[in-house]
Amino acid sequence: MGRPPCCDKVGIKKGPWTPEEDIILVSYIQEHGPGNWRSVPINTGLMRCSKSCRLRWTNYLRPGIRRGNFTPHEEGIIVHLQSLLGNRWAAIASYLPQRTDNDIKNYWNIHLKKKLKKHQAIGAIFAPPPPSEPSSIIPTTAGAGHVDLHHDMPLSKDYSSLHPAACTNTAEVTHQLIARRSPFAATDGDSSSSSYASSVDNISRLLDGFMKSSPPHNNTADIKPSATEVNPLLSFNQYQYHMAGGTTLPTFNDMLPSPPPQQPALMGHSGYDEPRQQHQQGPLSPIEKWLFEEAAEQVTGLMDLSDGCCSVPMMF
DNA sequence: AACAGACTCAACCGCCTACGA
DNA sequence: TTCGTAGGCGGTTGAGTCTGT
């Protein structure tokens, strides 16, 4: 059978979304919830493809999204998961609920790939890490040479500017990290953001207000199943949210893995999707093992930070 | 100040899979 | 079982912005 068009191409508007369109879309989703995207342009009068509506919502308008300013820790997660899962951005995004697959994909293509290339070159000059390195034994789906590249991250000039270990002033590090992770930092500090980006933030804030005043079923955490039910790793993500300036502070028990481990990709694209197919079953145990270790490490890091000490993320 | 090249990221495109008729 | 459709995903693009000269 031929590939059907996703929508009637005639009269479909393309290009950047306007604030008015965003408001219409957000209002509609507030009322009806995400899903049934086919009906969205029909019912709202938006001259947009249903896919475009879904993309706009999942990538930019839905609450809880953190834009830009990837932390070194997030970098580490992305690099590591990419080495394990390959370019399965949706699966990787399931470990970073505040990030969209598109964002992660862009960040990978723009920043991380360059860094890895850089370090690959460095690795060709310097000796490889000893085989006792923890991640060296983790199997990868993306080629053996891929796994250990991130160990060289601190060598990157770019990265060293972010890495707490590269800073001697703890307060500076903390401030830096928090500033970079603030949900509003991108708007206030990112001069590269388009003028409309701030409008998106405004909409998001409006939406946040709506969500806060709405019954739980409208909340982000409720659109998708309780993450702690679906994915034991979300506690880890909650910690990340805390580190990002959020208010959720997990308990130590939250950091502990809760068996049996679920398939990470079950959270799906940006945390909203239905379970993805079996083909996303990857080497889960290594991932989970690593993330659990990571989470445990972060508990220590959290304590260190609260004590005014400069913690060093495990990844680098 | 002006220009060119590099960079960033929002959005689109095309393919795939699930699901229902 | 087959076909049509919707939703989802990864790759790619192009416009806007930034940076260096």
Image (spheres, coloured by chain):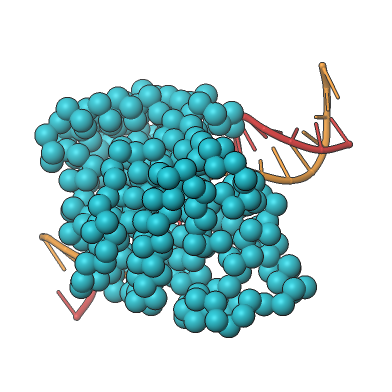
Chain colours: A cyan, B orange, C red
User: Taking the image as drawn, is residue A269 in sight?
Assistant: no
Q: Is residue A239 left or right of residue A84?
A: left
Most foreground residue, A230 or A148: A148
| Residue A164 pos. (x, y %) | 56, 49
Specify the farthest residue to the front.
Answer: A307
Work out whether residue A169 can be spotted. yes
Percent from the top left, x then y, of residue A256?
27, 64
**Residue A214, image x, y percentages:** 15, 31
Q: Residue at x 39, y 38 (%)?
A: A245
Front residue (pair A113, A237): A237
Q: Where on the picture, by quarter, is residue A293? A: bottom left
Q: Is residue A94 left or right of residue A187?
A: left
x and y, in percent, of residue A141 in the image: 48, 77
Q: Which corner quadrant holds the N terminus of chain A? A: bottom left
Q: Is C15 rendered above or below residue A269?
A: above
Residue at image coords 44%, 50%: A304
Instruction: Locate the C terminus of chain A by quadrant.
Output: bottom right
